[in-house]
Amino acid sequence: MSDTRNGTVPEIPAGTDGHDVVVVGGGAAGLNAALVLARACRRVAVVDAGQPRNAPAARMGGFLSRDGMAPAALLETGRAELAGYGVDLLDARVDHIEPAPSPRGPAFDVHLAGGPALRARRVVVATGLRDGLPELPGLAERWGRDVLHCPYCHGYEVRDRPLGVLGTHPGAVHQALLLRQWSADVVLLAHTLELSADDRARLAARGVRVVEGELKRVVVTDDRLRGVELADGTAVPREAVFLFPRAVPRDALLFGLACERDAQGWVTTDRTGRTSVPGVWAVGNVADPRAQVVTAAGAGAAAAFALNHDLVDEDVEHALAAA
């Protein structure tokens, strides 16, 4: 099939105008939702634009039986499993989703960018998020390599090394306190972060040193992070640095459907990922910025269970009406 990521229209397999479920997003959440639904004998399509959040990372951590696996390998394995169940896998972008007329219950037209629309009884949005990074020279190029975010994902691989935490987010203090679990040499690079007396006391008690001064750039030589340079020219040697990125959910499809948001602007869902719009589920990082790969996969499964029960209820009601 062709790929709208390269500017062409995907070739839709014959008969895909009537899916039970269209899953938008082919990360761990979307693929696991599709797997459970396919095993429930539902007609499923997965539309994926090929922008996984963890693409820069070399490996995953904390996923039982998949610990250390490359993120791309997990997705490749998952897609192969889905193909074995007859799931339609489309490399494409979804432009928008709109409600469609249906005598049975909720239905949607999932419009592909530059291509046709897929009709679905239910929709799972698993489009993830992107990490908004501070504008610091050299930082973005090292993201997911030795400029990191999650200690639980990457801390073990950099344990016992000199680590730094960039003071670019209010959560940096907690992140530094947490990272002390993995290394005895952790510094908080204060940058523009204002630290309270309580913050400083807690950091000192934990053995975390505070380095004052604004950051100028990330120092890289021979394709390895060597540390950071401050605005006054001071070099702070570090082998890895952590930061809190700004989580930017890819949620335009959800709010195009008028799904409700919470006070922080994130889509509101129940524990299964069901949104305020009947027939629409949101799972993974698009709904939960803290979800790791294993968490997102579990959320996809939970959504699939609830969604399938919802379809069964609708099927029973329709059968009763017909009788």
Image: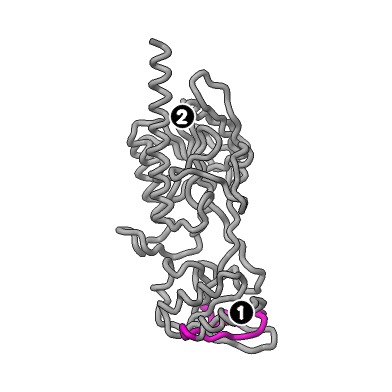
Give the CA distance from mark 2 to mark 1: 55 Å
Residue situated in front as seen by the camera: 76 or 258: 258
The stretch in magenta equals: 205-228
Counting from the top left corner in percent of width and height, residue 101 is at: 57, 22
Counting from the top left corner in percent of width and height, residue 137 is at: 65, 74
Q: Amino acid at mark 2?
A: His
Mark 1, secondary structure of its residue:
loop
Q: Residue furthest front?
A: 198
Say whether residue 112 is magenta. Answer: no
**Residue 216 located left or right of residue 102:** right
Mark found first going from the N terminus, 2 or 1: 2
Q: Which residue is mark 1?
A: 196
Mark 2, secondary structure of its residue:
strand
Quadrant position of residue 81: top left
Residue at 41 percent across and 77 percent down: it is 181
Q: Which residue is mark 2?
A: 19
Residue situated in front as seen by the camera: 5 or 282: 282
Q: Residue furthest left?
A: 65
Residue at 43 percent across and 66 percent down: it is 153
